[in-house]
Image (spheres, coloured by chain):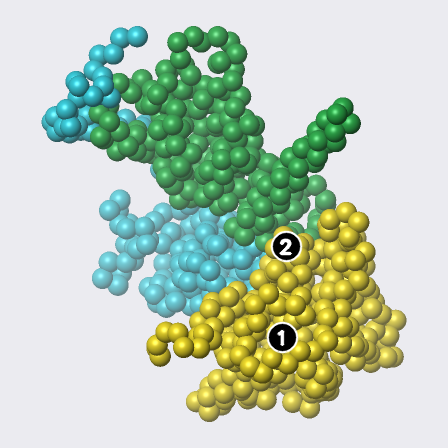
Amino acid sequence: MSTPVSIGDGVETPREPGGARMIATLALAGLISGVAIVGVYELTLPTILANRARALKAAVLQVVPGSQTMKPFTLDGGALVEATDDTPVEERIYAAYDEGGNLLGYAIPGEGNGFQDVIELIYGYDPKERKIVGLQVLESRETPGLGDKIRKDAAFVANFDDLSVDPEVVVVKNSHKTKGNEVDAITGATISSKAVVKILNVTNDRWLSHLGEK
Amino acid sequence: MKVSDPALLLRTAPFLRRNLTTPALMRDVIYALVPVIGASIWFFGVSAILVIVAATAGAMLTEWRFTPEGKGGAALADGSALLTGLLLALTLPPGIPLWMAFLGGVIGIGLGKLVWGGLGHNLFNPALVGRAFLQAAFPTVLTTWALHGGPSDFLAVRGANLAFPLLQGGVDAVTTATPLSMMKFDHNAVPAAALFLGNTAGSLGETSGVLILLSGIYLTVRRMFDWRIPAGVLLAAAIFSGILFLVAPDRYPTPLFTILSGGLLFGTVFMATDPVTSPLSPRGAWIFGAGIGFLVVLIRVFGGLPEGVMYAILLMNGATPLIERAVQPRPFGRGKHR
Amino acid sequence: MAERDGGDIYREFAKGLWKENPVFVQVLGMCPMLAVTNSAINAVAMAAATMFVLVGSSFLVSLLRKVIPKQVRISTYIIIIATFVTLADFTLQALSPSVHKELGAFIALIVVNCLILGRQEAFASRNGVLLSVLDALGMSFGFAIALLCLGSLREILGSGSIFGFSLCGPHFEPWVVMILPPGGFFMLGAILLFFGWWKEMKAKRRDSVTGRVA
């Protein structure tokens, strides 16, 4: 077997086999790996972005029932303007339209602390009725079997299909829901239920006053 | 075993010896449990009997099966597996599916005792290990409380008792809230008298404060456990919750409610005092008890759960070797005052 | 590695499957093992990503083993491994966003899986390319077997299904703890316990047979 450079053979290798060589090896390895990573990044980026956009669009169209198309908006000095590509994601909301291009409502993303970790959600808001018309939890790490019912319990999710935001959304326990702005908490997961409602109220405070009829 | 034949006696004089063996200790604790079991049957009827039988069967079968060959019978004879099964059952909600109660017994003995090397070697209380596993595995079932009643509905099988193994019970079972969860989520305190007599929702054995206290007094008089542990728990819980109550009476429960509600009394008398998993030295016993009392209030008031007795005891079980080391008496004439 | 007869090659591949199984015998790679095996499909995805990284790194490391100075070998291995991990991360994100979301940070954490660095140091840096790749393949399959084993058992108990197909109908009572991290410890402990018991039984049987002969 031919050994171009042998490292471990005592005599040929003094204690320092040349710092330059070590640095060169590391630099070369770094360079090659950098090139490889950038290459694959460029290759996969369009697919990754397309995936994200598709997931977002699906969520928006789901929480605003009947909508077919969407357009991102943002606030600029208190006025609602169409978002540009530079608008940060957390500054965006999404207007949803039916086939005829009529505005049906807005999909508003929100996030806040849950029982375990941050809950991210998106909900549909109808400015004419001043009602929440749908909700989808995008990301949560609530306890499986209890807290994750905010995502999986159809009865809980249905609370948000027709929910008044006046004066604000409140949680009630043991299926006592009587008024339009009340949400039935999940049995055994009161904290997660309250967390969702709190996110709604905080996000509503931020956006609703700007979302008149348009 | 520690009690009857300690390898190293940690106490200083006087060295009184008593003719106390493990089976005798277990027997006395089981006697003390009889009124509590009776109360659970009174309040929860045939369901209580079924759950107790299932959990005990799980514990005893596991003990028998996994003890080295030929010694299974002898291992059962000391009554410790029976006691573990009974204690586990009494901490479970009455409407629990029987297969879960059985599984709890298996885990309690298997994971809580046998893997450590058997009786006397376990770090954690086996019954609570079984319950902690069930709580982690089936949080909904373990926090679903069937209605309590009297002898009139003795024969009514509660909740999901008869669910087929691995499956859920019926979904339409009538349930209610425990005094603790009413307190935590609705700030609605159940009167102390009801807690004292036991006419409230809760685990099988935890509802009747007066009977548990009587059993505790019996065990103290018979000197079956170190009275310092329950004294430490109750004092610490009363003081800590008392301070909180004085600071904000409308937000925190009274010390009396704290002590009488939930599993605090039951856990204090029957589980914190387990001689295997609690410190032997008097000072250690005080620290251990006070730690439990403090943690219970801490978990109940500031934690996400309404009840914290189980985790408090398990945590202090884990701290026991540490406590023993910290309070070990200094041999006479050695070392300096710290 | 003077001679490479068929038996040698087979042995290097097969040792990782069972006799030196990275999880059950060497108890390596516990972090991903415990964290992501809450369902069979997650286990497969993690095993596939690990296999890609391990085989790729072993190949490169054994190819370059004579060029890399001894003093900087670990850093070089890490650069190589990290490159492959990043590639796997991007690729998975493009291929299957849902699985990528489930595995989350644990894809990136493959880089610190001691199984991978261990194979570079213990095998790939001392053996030829063919043997190193075989060794990596064997170890990866062994890792995959263990992950799949754990993932399936945890999914069966924790969700009543396997690869998403329900086994026990809608009334199954899930063992929530099994899909949480502690369930990984319980299940791994149970499996190791089973192997220990099995080994003991085998030894006992062998003893009793030899006893009879003598």
Amino acid at circle 1? Thr
- For marks 2 and 1, give the CA distance: 20 Å
Foreground residue, B195 or A178? B195
Residue A4: x and y in percent read: 22, 12
Image point (37%, 39%), residue name:
C112
Q: Is residue A118 left or right of residue B213?
A: left
User: Looking at the picture, do discs 2 and 1 lie on one chain?
Assistant: yes
Q: Is residue A97 placed above or below A182 in the rendered structure?
A: above
Residue A209: x and y in percent read: 35, 67
**Chain painted cyan:** A
First of labels 2, 1 by sequence position:
2
Image point (52%, 24%), residue name:
C15
Give the residue at mark 2: B117
Foreground residue, B87 or B63? B63
**Chain painted yellow:** B
Q: Which mark is residue B89?
A: none
Q: Colour of chain C?
A: green
Image quadrant in which you'd find residue C65 = top left
Foreground residue, C86 or A8? A8
Q: Chain of mark 1?
A: B
Is residue C181 visible in the rendered image? The answer is yes
Amino acid at circle 2? Gly
In what quadrant of the picture does the C terminus of chain B appear?
Answer: bottom left
Callout in the foreground (2, 1): 2
Q: Residues within 10 Å of mark 2 (few under 14, many from 20)?
A: few
Q: Chain of mark 2?
A: B
Is residue B132 visible in the rendered image? The answer is no
Residue A207: x and y in percent read: 35, 63
Q: Is residue B12 placed above or below A38 in the rendered structure?
A: below
Give the residue at mark 1: B273
Q: Is residue C93 placed above or below B175 in the rendered structure?
A: above
